[in-house]
C-alpha cells in the first residue's frame, strides 16, 4: 500500500464506494480504508434505491447492473402511505427493490472494474491535519498521508468525532430489533403498527427466512441483541414467538435524528451516515449518502487537481446540508405518524387523504424520490440548481441521451441553439452541439421554457441555462470549473 494519496476515504459502504468511483473517474489517486474483511454485508438493511439514485447511477452508465437484479416497483411511501410517482417525467419514475447487501455487492464489482483500491480489515483510528495535508492513522499501526480525508464511516464516524464536528439533533425515542430468523410455525406476514411502519414480519428475499422488525430493549449501547430479545419482542406483539430459531442476523436501529453541524473541517469532509443519521422510514439513508457522494466527488477532484480553490468544497455543505436536514424532518414526521394510538391513527388517516390528492402526492413524491432537489445557485432559468432531465438529443454523432453524455463525469455544455462559444480556457468542459424538439418538463415543477444552451455539472445539476452570449456563462464556467491551474490548493 502506498503511503501517500490525494484522497483517503474511511469506509467502503455505499457512500464511500460511490465517492471512490467518482474520484477515480476524475483521475484522482484515491484509496478506501474499510474495517470489514470483504464486501459481504450481513443482514439486509436498506430495501432499495429511489428514483434519483437510479438516475445518478444511470449518469455513469451503471444503472443497468442494479436494474438487472432488483425489482422495479412503485414503493415510495410516506409513513407507509404509498405514493405513486409513475407520472413523473423521469426514465426511472419508480423505485427498485434491492437489498443493501446486493447493492453493495454490485457497487463493489463496479468500483473494482474502475480500478478503485480498497484496503480491507483495518480501520481509520485517528488523524492530524495541517495546511499541507492529513496524516491518517490506521488500526494496524500503518499511516497514510493525503491531501484530503473523507469520512464515509457510518453513523458512529471516527472521522467526525476526531475532527470535533458537532452532531446535534434528537435522541432516540424508540429502538427496534431487526432480525433474520427461521420459525417453526408460520407467523402472519405484513406491516403492523408495532413494526414502526416497517415490520413486523416479512420474508427475506420474498421467500425463505423471516425478517422481523419489532420494538426492542431501549438502550442503544446495551449488549448486542440476542435471540432471547427477538423471542420476547414476538411474544409481546403476538403472544407467541412462533418457535423462533436459527437467526442469521440480529441488529437494532433507532429513530435518533442527528446531523453534522458542518460537512467540512479544513481538509476533512463527511458524507453519508457519517454526516446524518435518522430512522429508516421512507427508505432514504442510503440514497442520501450516494447523492452526497455524487455532489462531493467532482468538487473534491477539481480541488486536489488544482482546477478550483478549496472554497469550492464549501458549496458541498451549502448544498447537501439542507437536503439532509429535510430528510431528518421527514423521517421524524413519519415516526410520529406511526405511533400506535387512536389520535395518531386519525392523523395518519388525514395524511393519507391528503396524499390521495395530486399536489401533496407530487410534493412528497418529489422529496422521497430525490427528484425535486433544487440547490440554491441563484436566479435564472428554473433549471438552474435542478437536475438536468435525461433528454433524447440528436448530435453530429447520432442520437444519444444527456445522461450518456455524462458517463465520464465531466462538466458538459450543451448547445441546443445556433450560437457559438470558444471554451478553450475551460478545457475540462465538454461542449456538444445537439438538437432537441421535445417538451421540457421537470418533476413537481412541470413544464419549463426550452433553453438555447445548458451548462451541466458532473453531478447532473444545471449550473447555468440561457443564450451562449449571456455574460453570466463565462462567470458560471469560472466559478464552477476554474480558470486554469492554481498555484496552491491550501485549505
Ligand atoms: C433496518 C434498516 C433499514 C434501512 N432501510 C433503508 C432503505 O430502505 N433505504 C435507504 O436508503 N436506507 C436505508 N437504511 C439506511 C442505510 O442502511 C444507511 O443509510 C446506509 O448504509 C449508509 O451508507 P454509508 O455508506 O454512509 O454508511 P455505512 O453503510 O454505515 O458504511 C460505513 C462503512 O464504514 C466502515 N467503517 C466504519 N468505521 C470505520 C473506520 N473507522 N475505518 C474504516 N472503515 C470504517 C463500515 O464497516 C462500513 O462498511 C436502513 C437502515 C437500517 C438499519
Image: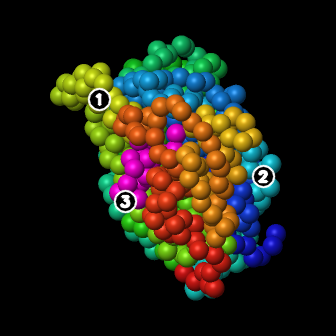
Is residue 194 visible to us here? no
Label 3 crowd bin: few (<14), some (14–19), many (20+), radius 10 Å: few
Considering depth in this image, is 396 or 356 the residue closer to the camera? 396
- Which stretch did the figure color magenta? 369-389
Residue 380: image quadrant is: bottom left
Q: Secondary structure at mark 3?
A: loop
Mark with earlier residue (1, 2): 2
Q: From the Cβ of disc 1, is ligand 1 less than 8 Å away?
A: no
Which residue is found at the position 46% from the left and 40% from the top? 450
User: On the image, numbered disc 3 is attached to which residue?
Assistant: 378
Task: Mark 3 vs mark 1: give the one in front.
Answer: 3
Spatial CA distance of label 1 from label 2 is 42 Å
- Regarding residue 419, the answer to whether it shows in the image is yes
Task: List the single residue furthest toward the left.
Answer: 343
Tell me which numbered mark, 2 or 3, is placed earlier along the sequence.
2
- Helix, strand or loop at mark 1: helix
Amino acid at each position: 500500500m502506498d503511503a501517500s494519496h490525494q484522497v483517503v476515504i474511511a469506509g467502503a459502504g455505499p457512500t464511500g464506494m460511490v465517492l471512490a468511483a467518482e474520484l477515480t473517474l476524475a483521475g484522482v489517486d484515491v484509496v478506501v480504508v474499510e474495517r470489514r474483511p470483504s464486501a459481504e454485508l450481513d443482514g439486509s438493511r436498506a430495501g432499495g434505491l429511489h428514483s434519483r439514485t437510479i438516475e445518478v447511477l444511470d449518469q455513469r452508465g451503471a444503472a443497468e447492473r442494479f436494474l438487472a437484479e432488483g425489482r422495479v416497483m412503485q414503493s415510495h411511501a410516506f409513513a407507509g402511505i404509498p405514493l405513486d410517482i409513475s407520472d413523473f417525467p423521469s426514465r426511472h419514475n419508480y423505485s427498485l427493490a434491492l437489498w443493501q447487501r446486493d447493492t453493495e455487492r454490485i457497487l463493489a464489482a463496479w468500483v473494482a472494474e474502475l480500478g478503485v483500491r480498497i484496503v480491507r480489515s483495518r480501520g481509520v483510528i485517528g488523524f492530524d491535519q495541517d495546511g499541507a495535508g492529513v496524516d491518517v492513522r490506521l488500526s494496524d499501526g500503518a499511516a497514510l498521508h493525503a491531501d484530503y480525508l473523507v469520512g464515509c464511516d457510518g453513523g458512529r464516524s471516527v472521522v467526525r468525532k476526531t475532527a470535533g464536528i458537532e452532531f446535534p439533533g434528537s435522541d432516540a425515542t424508540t429502538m427496534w430489533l431487526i432480525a433474520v430468523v427461521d420459525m417453526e410455525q408460520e407467523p402472519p406476514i405484513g406491516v403492523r403498527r408495532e413494526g414502526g411502519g416497517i415490520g413486523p414480519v416479512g420474508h427475506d428475499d420474498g421467500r425463505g427466512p423471516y425478517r422481523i422488525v419489532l420494538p426492542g430493549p431501549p438502550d442503544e449501547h446495551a449488549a448486542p441483541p440476542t435471540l432471547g430479545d427477538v423471542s420476547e419482542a414476538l411474544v409481546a406483539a403476538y403472544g407467541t414467538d412462533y418457535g423462533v430459531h436459527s437467526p442469521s442476523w440480529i441488529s437494532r436501529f433507532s429513530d435518533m435524528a442527528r446531523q453534522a453541524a458542518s460537512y467540512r473541517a479544513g481538509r476533512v469532509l463527511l458524507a453519508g451516515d457519517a454526516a446524518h443519521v435518522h430512522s429508516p422510514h421512507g427508505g432514504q439513508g442510503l440514497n442520501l449518502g450516494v447523492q452526497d457522494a455524487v455532489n462531493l466527488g467532482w468538487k473534491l477532484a477539481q480541488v486536489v487537481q488544482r482546477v478550483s480553490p478549496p472554497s469550492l468544497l464549501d458549496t458541498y455543505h451549502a448544498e447537501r446540508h439542507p437536503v439532509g436536514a429535510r430528510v431528518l424532518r421527514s423521517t421524524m414526521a413519519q415516526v410520529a405518524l406511526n405511533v400506535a394510538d387512536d389520535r395518531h391513527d386519525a392523523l395518519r388517516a388525514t395524511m393519507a387523504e391528503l396524499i390521495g390528492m395530486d399536489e401533496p402526492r407530487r410534493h412528497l413524491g418529489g422529496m422521497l424520490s430525490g427528484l425535486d432537489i433544487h440547490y440554491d445557485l441563484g436566479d435564472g432559468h428554473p433549471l438552474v440548481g435542478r437536475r438536468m432531465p435525461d433528454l433524447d438529443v440528436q448530435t453530429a454523432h447520432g442520437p444519444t441521451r444527456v445522461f450518456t453524455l455524462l458517463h465520464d463525469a465531466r462538466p458538459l455544455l450543451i448547445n441546443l441553439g445556433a450560437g457559438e462559444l470558444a471554451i478553450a480556457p475551460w478545457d475540462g468542459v465538454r461542449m456538444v452541439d445537439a438538437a432537441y424538439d421535445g417538451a421540457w418538463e421537470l418533476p413537481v415543477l412541470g413544464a419549463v421554457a426550452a433553453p438555447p444552451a445548458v451548462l451541466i455539472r458532473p453531478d447532473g445539476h444545471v449550473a447555468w441555462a440561457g443564450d451562449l452570449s449571456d455574460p453570466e456563462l463565462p462567470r458560471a464556467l469560472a466559478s464552477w470549473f476554474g480558470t486554469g491551474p492554481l498555484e496552491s490548493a491550501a485549505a
